[in-house]
Image (cartoon, rainbow, N blue to C red):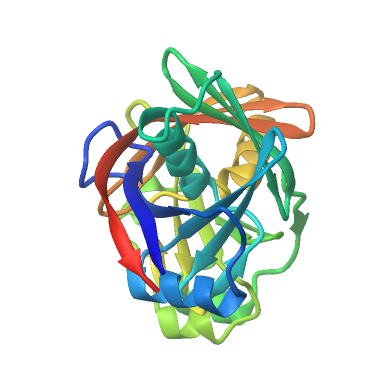
Amino acid sequence: MKLDIYQADAFTSKVFGGNPAALVPLDEWLPDQTLLNIAIENNLSETAFTVPQGDKYHLRWFTPGGEVQLCGHATLATAYIMFEELDYEGDVITFSTLSGDLFVHKTNIGLMMDFPIWEREEIDTPEYVIKAFGKEPIAYFKGNDDMAVFDDPTFIRRLQPDLSALKDGNARGVLVTAPGDEHYDFISRAFFPKLCIDEDPVTGSAHCILTPYWAQRLNKNKLVAHQASKRGGDLLCELKGDRVEITGQAAMYMKGEIYV
């Protein structure tokens, strides 16, 4: 079987930045193991798959370690490819996902994703997290992914965590964050060794928990965020009730065919 495949870099205006994601558009679903095998073969943090569903598209995301419930950068890349390469008509795409309906709007500053917020609960910092980061955060929250808050952006930028300690822990992934420097309200990084992703370059879904926290702490709903990985990426985030609007750009890298 021959399938089309596309790859774009999300949360960047130029290739080789942001976070790469692949899209494989389908007419109908293939077995889950085939989807996982494609994701493993691609060896990207996310491979997205779509199937038309009335006036929506059913969207699923797979890491090399398995399916996930929500992925921001692959949603952004998917929408960008649909608008730019697959001739999608209209300015809004609705995706049916494991996290409910998600909406991506074409705007004059990029693609805006409308996502649900992620609830958080402050807890004592687990010992494995302190071991992994070599320092206890000023606050620690349990959520879909855990979030460790520090007070120094330089610490975040220079951090080289003990990934084996994180992999042995309970959290699916751990986000680290601190107040911003230069032009940013806050910065972050994201580590997912349990999903076979040591560090995710730019994580849209992470901002579903980061944005509500920083909006409350900074007393502002519109925030400029930076994910300080090696590739790096910028995100415009706005808290609107129980939703987060995340805006970013993308750049096309590759299109081709795969055989499964």
Q: Quadrant of the N terminus?
A: bottom left
| Quarter where residue 136 is shown | bottom right
The percent coordinates of residue 16 (x first, y second) are: 20, 47
The percent coordinates of residue 190 (x first, y second) are: 46, 59
Across the whole image, how many numbered discs are drawn on residues? 0
Residue drawn where x is 53% and y is 56% of the image: 49
Q: In the image, 4: left or right of 100? A: left
Q: In the image, 198: left or right of 69? A: left
Residue drawn where x is 45% and y is 35% of the image: 82
Spot the residue most to the front: 1
Q: Quadrant of the C terminus?
A: bottom left
Residue 185 visible in the current orientation: yes
The residue lying toward the viewer, choosing from 90 and 98, is: 90
Work out whether 131 lies above or below 91: below
The percent coordinates of residue 81 (x first, y second) are: 40, 38
Residue 130 visible in the current orientation: no
Work out whether 104 lies above or below 190: above
| Quarter where residue 32 is shown | bottom right
Q: In the image, 36: left or right of 54? A: left
Q: In the image, 190: left or right of 241? A: left
The percent coordinates of residue 116 (x first, y second) are: 72, 40
Residue drawn where x is 60% and y is 68% of the image: 67
Residue drawn where x is 56% and y is 79% of the image: 33
The residue lying toward the viewer, choosing from 32 and 21, is: 32
The residue lying toward the viewer, choosing from 104 and 201, is: 104
